[in-house]
Structures are given as C-alpha cells and as structure tokens.
Image (cartoon, grey):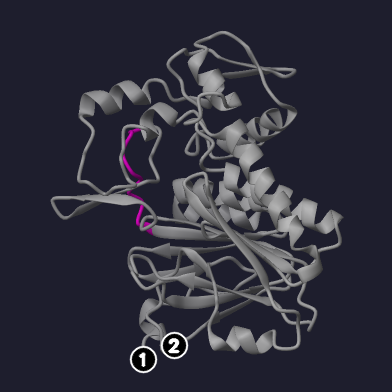
Amino acid sequence: MNLLFFVKKHMICILFFLCILTVSGCTAFQKHLSDPVTKTGFYFDTVITLTIYDDSQKSLLDDCFSLADKYEKLFSSSISTSDIAKINQAGQAPVTVDDETISLLNTGLKYCALSGGGFDITIGALSSLWNFSKNDGFLPSSGEIKEAVSSVGYQNIIISGNEVSLKNPDAKIDLGGIAKGYIADRMKELLNENGVTEGTINLGGNVLCLGEKKDGSNYRIGIQKPFDEHGTAAAVVEVTDQTVVSSGVYERYITIDDKIYHHILNPATGYPYENHLLGVTIICDHSVDGDALSTVCFSLGLDQGMQLIESLADTEAIFITDDEKFHCSSGIGDAIPFEELTP
C-alpha cells in the first residue's frame, strides 16, 4: 500500500473524526486544475459532501444524491416503508426485500461473525434507547438495557433468497455502522462509470477518494482530534483511490455526572465499550469495509484489533489509546507516544 502518514509536531495530536483539508496548502495543490464542483446534502442523519473537478459532469452529483435518497429509503430503520423497517416490524414473518438490501445484510453478517458479535447489526432495540444526538444527559434504566440486550444477536437474521426474517420477534436491525460505507462505494462506482476519476466523497467524515489527482499528488485527508470544537486537524493521511474511515468515542455521546457515555455500544452489556480506546481509523480500498472495520476493531480492542488488521491485505489502521498514544499497523509505522508529538 502506497501510504504516507504525516504528523505535525505543532499540533496537539489525538486522532480522529475525518475532514477534508481545506487549508491554503490544499488550494495550492489544485491551482492548475478545474475549479471544484461541490454538492452537500443530509442523509442518514449526517452531512454528505461530494466534490469533483469536472464542471461538465456536475449533473452526476445530482445522480449521486438520488442514490443516497434511494438507499436511505431502503436501509434506514426510521423510515417505516424501508426494507429494514419492514423486517423489524414483521416479527418473525419473512419479508421480501431488494437485492441490495440482501447484499448489505450479508456484508454486515460477515463482520458480525468476524468480530465475534462485538459488532452486531441487530443492535437496533439497544441503540434506540440512547439519545446521543442531543447529549441531554438521559441514561436508560438498567431494566431497559437488559431487555434490549436480550434481543441482540446477529444469528437471529435468517436470509433465504430475497426473503429476510428474524428468529426473535423483538430483534431490530440497525445498519448505521455499515450503510454509509456501502453508499459511498456505490457513488464512486457511478462516478467512475461516467468517466469521473478525481474527487472526494465525504459521508459525515467517512471519506472516499477517487483515483489520483491529475497533478500526480495524493489526497491529503485531515484527521481531527477528538472533542475539538473547531475541527482542528491533528494529523494528515495521504491516500490515492482509497477510503479513510474512523470510529471514535467523541463522535456522539452524552455526559452524565462528568462521565462520558459514547455511541459505540457493547452488545453484550448494553453500555458503551470501555477498552482504553479513544478511536480507530481504517485506511482501505472499499468504504463499506472501512466503515465496518472501524467499529469491529474498536470492539476488539487494541491487541485483537491490530491482529485482525495485520491479517488483512491492503488494510491499515491507526488506534488511539486513552494514554494518548498512536498505535499504527505495520504499513504505516510504529506507535508514536503522545509526548513526542507536542512542542
């Protein structure tokens, strides 16, 4: 993998949450290129931003957003007419769904098994108890959590052809941990098929880069430090035709009695993981894999998560532990102590 990882010593360096760098340095890279054409929208409770460098193809951005609308109507559990909502509402009755819903469910189940259930797409009843979006200090009761945990288990999903049913009628599918990556990959396919091979797809920080820049340089993806209100970039990852995806404790959380409860829930306990990780960033070829792996590796913890990454081809990862240290897979470099990165 042709991957460069740069850390700027004048920054306070705790990694995570991805953002495309828009500082003047990036502008300089693109002076001789066509002006960027950008479109922004809101799907799957996140901001989507697409950028290409061919004004004659800007109508393709509308086509990409039509895809986002299509997939939200298939995969969102909060839309009552979606495939996922229909499965969740059907109890144990089989529901006929779209081919792409089957494809995404099968991919999700693969990563459920890979994580040993630490990542589980039947976590819907549990995740719906927590109101991370408003950070209103609401903590579900232990009884509610226990009941929701009893419904979680990816083995409850039965797929036969295009029919899907649930063994446990209380189980609820939630594809929030993998759907954005799938959508980003489909957008990239659409753009590539129509001759667009330069640009970026950013689905709420899930960044997918198309091809290489016309000037031969890599894309420079900034990684924001956790809990930073100004989006300060703590480090830069350079990639070509790859995706950069992270899961971190700072993305969505509530604070109760000075304790942070983040959105990455342990399906076995019903509470957020407490494994000394602040987050995980994945660099790989396909965004659906990066999306799932970022949560899978977080659930596994540093040691097992790193072992998994080292066993996968064309995949790298950066783990941040709560002692403020970088732990990078072999394709990136050695772990970098936090104190070495400060002035």
In percent of width and height, residue 60 lies at 76, 56
Which quarter of the picture shows residue 212? bottom right
Query: Is 201 rendered above or below residue 238?
Result: above
Q: Looking at this view, is 185 or 338 the one in front? A: 185
The answer to whether residue 287 is left or right of residue 223 is right
Mark 1 — residue? Answer: 343
Query: Where, by quadrant of the figure, is residue 131 drawn?
Result: top left
Answer yes or no: is residue 219 visible. yes
Q: Tally the marks.
A: 2
Camera-side residue: 25 or 250? 25
Q: Which residue is mark 2?
A: 9
**Residue 7 shown left or right of residue 324 in the figure:** right
Q: Secondary structure at mark 1?
A: loop
Residue 113 showing in the rendered view: no
For the stretch drawn in magenta, the main secondary structure is loop
Earlier in the chain: of badge 1 and badge 2, it is: 2
At label 1, the amino acid type is Pro
Q: Residue at x 20, y 30 (%)?
A: 141
The spot of residue 3 in percent (x, y) is 68, 73
Q: Are marks 1 and 2 in contact (CB under 8 Å)?
A: yes
Where does the image place residue 259, in percent across and percent down from the top left? 20, 52
The stretch drawn in magenta includes residue 34: no
Report if residue 271 lies within the magenta region.
yes
Percent across and percent down for residue 136 are 22, 46
Q: Which residues are magenta?
A: 269-277
Q: Residues within 10 Å of mark 1 (few under 14, many from 20)?
A: few
Residue 224's place in the image compared with 303, above or below, is below
Q: Amino acid at mark 2?
A: Lys
| Observer-nearest of 70 and 2 | 70
